Amino acid sequence: MKTILDFDFLNKTALIRVDFNVPLDSNLEVIDNTRILSAKPTILKILKDGGSCVLMSHLGRPKGIQASLSLTNIVSEIEKTLERKITFAADCIGVETEKIVNNIKPGEIVLLENLRFYSEETDGNEDFAEKLSKLGQVYVNDAFGAAHRKHSSTAVITKFFKNKKYLGLLLHKEVHAIEKVLKTGEKPIIAVLGGAKVSSKITIINNILEKVDEIILGGGMAYTFIKAKGGEIGNSICENDKLDLALEVISKAKANNVILHLPTDVIAADDFCNNANTKELNIFNIPKGWQGLDIGPNSRKSFADAIINAKTILWNGPMGVFEMTNFANGTKAVGEAIKAATQKGAFSLVGGGDSVSAVKEFGLADDVSYVSTGGGAMLESLEGKTLPGIAALQ
Ligand code: AMP
């Protein structure tokens, strides 16, 4: 696969699929501009070459045209972040938009209206993809957050660009980070997995059991494992129909010589709220009326000891209900241990939803090697799937 570094964009118009699906508050102000910032290096490289950029993205999940999800709402944030003026096209396809794009000069940027104002986009409609393809001479995909979707602008469109299709720098970084963990990672490789449910992580667990040396399983899903092993878990979260599956994971880890770490102690609470009464308990002996909402001090220490010795680290999912300050210490301890291992030279990748929010909240985002920008796309990559948006560039 070729990246934009393999091409000189002088006098060329690049049609770039970006992921500007940024969170907005009730005043339609951008809350977090990370995704815009992450696409900046790709855009600047093309402009620096003497090319021009036509940016296309979705925003939210509109049903038809919806003013609150128009990309006009984020134009000023994009201009601020890119430190460039942009021209807005009020439609993402059509004669008027083609006119705007045909008048574009080297160094200029055009932003198209929300792709998902057309249901054809998510349908992966080929005619729609062909209409979009008229808006650039070269196609670039830099939208990792949408790369797991087989949509017109991410996967179908490449058909119209033959060998003029490139990975943007962000997409390349994401793919490279995943490879560095799952394919070329320096041993020992450790995966730290947490989150609420075994069912939503089982495909990832099964895939990485073949690739890593050690796995830490924390968070809500650990209780299904402890119950399967005969523990009393009180009112802790548990998927009773997944007990056999948990035992299978335990045997598969043994068969693959993977060291499986489970918590040994917990911070238990008598209610699911931050000011509940709490006590430290052995995870195998949680009485009725109490639920484990975080890992305990012994588990924090043993998990940290395992992490500090790793050379490659993957982290997905919190160790407890970290949204409540009294149950955030386990997640924080894991984050701190990953920071320390990274300082010692390990490669660390944090990806997939809640662990990304956790590292940002604890101020650790700059202390790990890479924080992924794509939730679903990262999870599917960790499941071992080839993402349609990436396959289309091959
Ligand atoms: P996931 O989206 O599967 O990664 O799960 C993340 C969610 O799991 C977070 O919102 C956590 O609050 C929740 N979680 C983590 N540990 C526990 C626990 N012990 N009991 C209940 N929920 C938990």
Image (cartoon, rainbow, N blue to C red):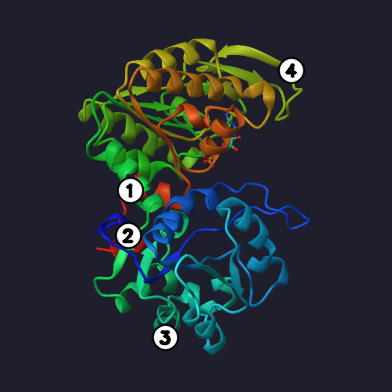
Question: For the residue marked with disc 3, what is the amino acid?
Answer: Asp
Q: Is residue 258 left or right of residue 233?
A: left
Please tell me which residue is depicted at 53% across the width and 49% down the height of the picture.
37
The residue carrying mark 1 has its beta carbon less than 8 Å from ligand 1: no
Res 117 → quadrant: bottom right
* Distance in Å between CA atoms under marks 4 and 3: 60 Å
Please tell me which residue is depicted at 37% across the width and 46% down the height of the picture.
174
> In this figure, which residue is indicated by the disc labeled 1?
175
Identify the secondary structure beneath mark 2: helix
Mark carried by residue 127:
3
The residue carrying mark 2 has its beta carbon less than 8 Å from ligand 1: no
* Distance in Å between CA atoms under marks 1 and 3: 29 Å
* Distance in Å between CA atoms under marks 4 and 2: 49 Å
Identify the secondary structure beneath mark 1: helix
* Distance in Å between CA atoms under marks 1 and 4: 44 Å
Identify the secondary structure beneath mark 3: helix
Mark carried by residue 384:
none
Question: For the residue marked with disc 2, what is the amino acid?
Answer: Ile
* Quadrant of the image containing the C terminus: bottom left
Res 294 → quadrant: top right
Front residue of this view, candidates 287 and 173:
173
> In this figure, which residue is indicated by the disc labeled 2?
390
Q: Measured from the top left, where is residue 192 in percent x and y?
A: 41, 29
Indicate which quadrant contains ligand 1: top right
Q: Is residue 206 left or right of residue 88?
A: left
Question: For the residue marked with disc 4, what is the amino acid?
Answer: Asn
* Distance in Å between CA atoms under marks 2 and 1: 9 Å
Question: For the residue marked with disc 1, what is the amino acid?
Answer: Val
Please tell me which residue is depicted at 49% across the width and 72% down the height of the picture.
122
Q: Is 205 drawn above or below residue 37 in the view shown?
A: above
